[in-house]
């Protein structure tokens, strides 16, 4: 009796399963019913199926902005004017550029830029990035050694030593430019008067901070203590000075440098490959000179360095490129030409002005040959 009952029960189950399979085959839908079984024997809650074919086509916010939805991920419309206001004193002859329209020289090469994603990004956002650089550049230091007993020659020796250290550890140029900026800005904003013996600790700590900020694999504190400072500075001294520098800067480590403004400007005028190496070398020379770096903004110095590179490497089209430089950076022509002559004179007489500082030549041999050509 039990066997017959089991057979009947199995046949009914098989029939029910087969019927369910046939129903699933006949039911041609892209989605399935989703059931949620709650615990404690509560009733099942079933959600209705959604047919994909009947769904309205969803907008792609990456290519088209929905005015009803606030999203950061959309392609921007036509560039609009942006104003930058600052209450800080701008001490060099430059005003922050107000117009964000891209330079005409880039507009002519738009077809080429569309093929390269990086160039396309520069075309779309490079002008705004440069405006942001100039807004940060307008808040700069002025005569930052005036309240300290540190001489300009001693500062130049520190800059030269930074070249040796950061190049030996294969750091980027941007790390060097940032380290110098942090050192100068700290000396300008600190309320404490520093003596020449303090500059070694300040320079080492600024290199340590810039390294952590810019490099993918920064130099560890142990290496800084043993190899760079040669155990003359303890780890605690470097940590304490790092805290002092960040507090003096109000933890605002983000800021522009000569390297950033030069690189973006050369990208906007399509001369990055032609002039970048020479212009960056000239910018490094500028960092040695206290009078130039303490009296002019980075934008004016960048424009002057690029004009020198243009006169050297782009003689056939130099008038057109110089006009583009002045337009992109929004600097005065006569003052920039005068500043470029000062920088050129500094480059020609670098050995006389800084006779014992050899690291810049040692680690930039190709650019040194270009400077020799300028002397002829």
Image (tube, helix red, strand yellow):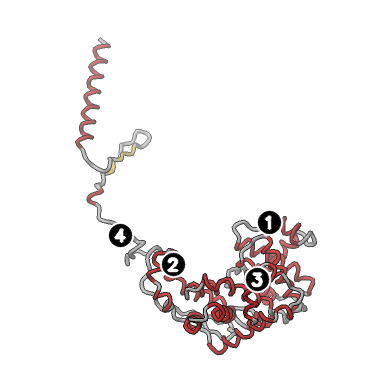
Q: Residue at x 49, y 84 (%)?
A: 319
Lower sequence index among marks 2 and 1:
2
Could you tell me which quadrant the N terminus lies in?
top left
Q: Nearer the viewer, mark 2 or mark 1?
A: 2
- Nearer the observer, 297 or 268: 268
Distance Cα–Cα, label 4 vs label 1:
48 Å
Please rate how many residues cluster around mark 3, counting C-alpha atoms within 10 Å: few if below 14, some from 14 to 19, many from 20. many
Can the viewer see residue 22 in this picture?
A: yes
* Secondary structure at numbered mark 3: helix
Q: Which mark is residue 220?
A: 1
Whether pointer 2 and pointer 3 mark residues with C-beta atoms closer than 8 Å, the reply is no
Q: Quadrant of residue 196?
A: bottom right
Tell me, for residue 121, which label it has, or none.
2
Name, please, the residue furthest toward the bottom: 334
Q: Which mark is residue 59?
A: 4
**CA separation in Å, label 3 and label 1:** 19 Å
The disc, 3 or 1, on the residue closer to the chain's N-terminal end is 3
- The image position of residue 221, as x and y in percent, is 70, 57
Read off the residue under disc 3. Answer: 182
Decide: marks 4, 1 in contact (CB < 8 A)? no
Q: Earlier in the sequence, mark 4 or mark 2?
A: 4
Residue at 58% across / 69% down in the picture? 254
Q: Nearer the viewer, residue 356 or 30?
A: 356
Q: Is residue 304 above or below residue 175?
A: below
């Amino acid at each position: 009796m039990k066997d017959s009952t089991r057979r009947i029960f199995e046949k009914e189950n098989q029939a029910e399963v087969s019927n369910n399979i046939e129903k699933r085959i006949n039911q041609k839908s892209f989605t399935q019913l989703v059931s949620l079984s709650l615990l404690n024997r509560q009733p099942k809650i079933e959600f209705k199926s959604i047919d994909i074919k009947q769904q309205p086509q969803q907008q792609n916010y990456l290519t088209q902005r929905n005015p009803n939805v606030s999203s950061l991920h959309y392609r921007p419309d036509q560039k609009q004017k942006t104003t930058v206001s600052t209450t800080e004193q701008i001490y060099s002859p430059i005003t922050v550029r107000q117009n964000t329209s891209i330079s005409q020289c880039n507009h002519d090469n738009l077809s080429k830029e569309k093929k390269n994603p990086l160039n396309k990004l520069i075309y779309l956002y490079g002008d705004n990035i440069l405006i942001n650089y100039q807004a940060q550049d307008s808040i700069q230091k002025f005569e930052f050694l005036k309240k300290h007993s540190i001489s300009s020659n001693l500062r130049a020796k520190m800059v030269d030593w930074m070249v040796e250290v950061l190049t030996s550890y294969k750091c980027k140029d941007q790390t060097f430019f940032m380290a110098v900026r942090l050192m100068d800005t700290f000396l300008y904003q600190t309320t404490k008067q520093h003596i020449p013996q303090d500059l070694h600790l300040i320079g080492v700590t600024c290199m340590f901070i810039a390294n952590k900020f810019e490099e993918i694999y920064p130099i560890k504190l142990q290496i800084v203590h043993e190899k760079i400072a040669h155990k003359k500075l303890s780890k605690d001294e470097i940590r304490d000075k790092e805290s002092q520098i960040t507090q003096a800067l109000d933890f605002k480590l983000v800021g522009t440098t000569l390297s950033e403004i030069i690189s973006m400007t050369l990208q906007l005028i399509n001369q990055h490959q032609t002039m970048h190496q020479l212009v960056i070398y000239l910018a490094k020379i500028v960092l040695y000179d206290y009078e130039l770096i303490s009296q002019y903004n980075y934008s004016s110095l960048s424009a002057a360095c690029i004009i020198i590179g243009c006169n050297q490497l782009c003689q056939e089209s130099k008038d057109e490129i110089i006009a583009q430089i002045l337009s992109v950076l929004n600097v005065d022509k006569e003052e920039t030409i005068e500043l470029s002559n000062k920088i050129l004179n500094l480059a020609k007489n670098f050995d006389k002005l800084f006779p014992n500082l050899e690291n810049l030549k040692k680690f930039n041999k190709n650019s040194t040959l270009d400077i020799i050509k300028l002397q002829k």
